[in-house]
Image (spheres, rainbow, N blue to C red):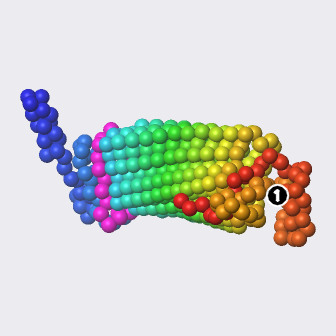
Amino acid sequence: MKKIIPVLLMLFYFTTRAQVVEVCPTCEVSSIQKAIDLADNGDTIKIAKGTYREQEIKIIDKSLHLLGEGYPVIDAQFKGTALTVRAENFSLEGLKIINIGTSHTSDHAAILVSGSKNFRIENNRLENIFFGILVEKSSHGVISRNQISSKAVSQAKSGNGIHMWNCSDLTVSNNIVKSVRDGIYLEFSKNCTITNNLCEGNLRYGLHFMFADNNKYLDNTFDNNGAGVAVMYSKFIEMQRNLFRKNWGPASYGLLLKEINDAELKNNIFEDNTIAISADNTNRINYINNEFRGNGYAVRIRGACYKNVFTANSFIANSFDVSYTGNINENEFSRNYWSEYTGYDLDKDGIGDVPYRPVKLFSYLVNRTPEAIILLRSMFIGLLDFSEKVSPVFTPAELTDDYPQMKKIKW
């Protein structure tokens, strides 16, 4: 009891000591930077509605809480980063930050967080930005309910919406990111959760992983981006309940997997993508209960893919369900539903009595001669595919689903 009383006294001291510093265009304190300079650890800076033409605002080693009322506008006037934070236990909420300067040598951002931990960036609006929220060498933060948008035209002159480099234990949730280069980007970051975000109309990727292990992305929507998601050079990734939709283009994917190991894709929907999944040098990936609907290619597997399992997935009305190059390499397709399966089920157990070969000869031809795609719906191509199923020569004979499901898989 004697030890508890001093702790309670200290908490009471710091709680009563914390103050509110008010900022408004007509107040004695009319500058956000001045308010930060006047504030002490634990203080709240309340920013009234209005426009503040400031840039290079800095919070260094102060645990402050910036709270905007009515979305006050911080206009960086295209002169660099708007707000830089290097501190612990801070929060930024209710701000509107606009007009971030572009650069080929510096990563100017609306909000730059560096070397920080235990922070929250919530409910902000970032418009006409280069980078939106740039987080480096930081941990244990929450980035939530922000709206981020720009007017990205070329990759060289645009940045990412939420960019994390060398970070850990971050949660990125319920954000809307539009018209930037990459919606959300992780590099050398681990133990992060990306959930319930909308990444739409971004120039390159909705979500981009590079050398980022032990991360999760769940319940996100990737709609009409240059490509939906790229996961590269990473391992132990969990990908569940995401929607990959309308990611169209000559080199576009719903999901690009390159040199990925030990991951799981479960309960995702891939709809109307040029290529739903492109896998290259991926090993021990479990694809479970996913739905592929109306894509050009549902699954395109390139070389050096080993011990991947596709089970209980639904392939519905895709131009090509599976495109496959190379050896089977212990990859397994089992108990999936294929809308083009024409076999029968005499014993009524829900499983087709005839194995299904999902790789068409025509997909092999299109891989070698892309111009052949104009023959996709011709009767001649149907005859070629049928003859290849009867006597495989160019497609992997051992790639079969021996237990094709007669009905679409229910989750």
Which residue sits at x=51%, y=43%?
A: 215
Q: Is residue 94 visible?
A: yes
Q: Residue at x 90, y 50 (%)?
A: 393
Location of residue 286 by image quarter: top right
Residue at mark 1: 360
Does the stretch in magenta take in 60?
yes
Along the viewing direction, whichever of 284 and 76 lies nearer the viewer = 284
Q: Nearer the viewer, residue 288 or 177?
A: 288
> Percent position (x, y) of residue 395?
84, 50
For image coordinates 74% across by 64% down, the residue present is 344
Magenta residues? 58-76
Give residue 188's quadrant in the image: top right
Which residue is painted at 74% across and 48% down in the image? Answer: 301
Check the image and name the residue furthest to the front: 347
Say which quarter of the image contains residue 54.
Answer: bottom left
The amino acid marked with disc number 1 is: Lys
Residue 155 visible? The answer is no
- The answer to whether residue 267 is left or right of residue 274 is left
Residue 173: percent from left, percent from top: 44, 54
Q: Residue 121, image x and y in percent? A: 38, 52
